[in-house]
Image (spheres, rainbow, N blue to C red):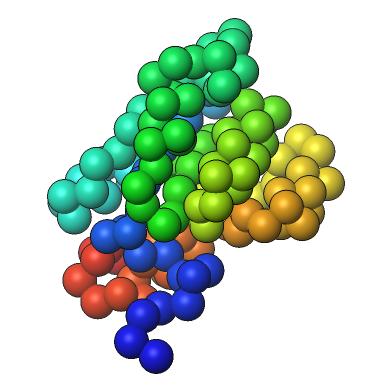
Amino acid sequence: MSNAPYNIIRLSDAKIVRITPAHRGDTDKSDALDASVASLKKTNTKIHVFSEGEMPPWDQPDLATLVDAASKRQFIIICDDVSAFVVALAHMALEIGCNTFVVCQTELPDDPHTPSRLEHAGAVVMTYARFVEECALTPGVVET
């Protein structure tokens, strides 16, 4: 097999979206995640940043257009936690056929059933640390 399996992250074949919370309750965690995400820019990977806001993702024209125009095989959502907004965005990406990864700062969301719901739909849910490990499977992709 010359290509990695579909459920292994390949940044060269991924569209990455950073979702920031509308209300930053724990700014230390969010700031740490933003600093970690900034290290991905060394790989020349474009990261699209959106705030959750009051509207669902399908009502945010720039975000909806980004999902609809996904020309990459993988769609990676990096978030502080798995909110309803993130769940909806993941389902949008899954519906157009993207291999979807939800990468979150926290181990478990407020609702412990959310990861299994996303995984049942076809998304891969993981922590940011695990994301970095999986990217490291591709030599030279992410410096650890």
Note whether residue 20 is visible: no
Residue 112: where, in percent of width, then height?
Answer: 81, 46
Vertical comparison of 78 with 86: above or below: below
- Looking at the image, which residue sits at the far bottom? 1
Residue 99: where, in percent of width, then height?
Answer: 52, 57
Query: What residue is shown at x 45% (from left), y 35% (from top)?
Result: 67
Query: What residue is shown at x 65% (from left), y 32% (from top)?
Result: 88
Vertical comparison of 125 with 16: above or below: below
Note whether residue 56 is visible: yes
Vertical comparison of 128 with 92: above or below: below
* The one of 35 and 131 positioned closer to us in this rendering: 131
Query: What residue is shown at x 24% (from left), y 41% (from top)?
Result: 46
Query: What residue is shown at x 34% (from left), y 71% (from top)?
Result: 136
Residue 49: where, in percent of width, then height?
Answer: 36, 28
Left or right? Give the position of 30 relative to 116: left
Residue 45: where, in percent of width, then height?
Answer: 23, 48
Q: Quadrant of the C terminus?
A: bottom left
* The one of 49 and 97 positioned closer to us in this rendering: 97
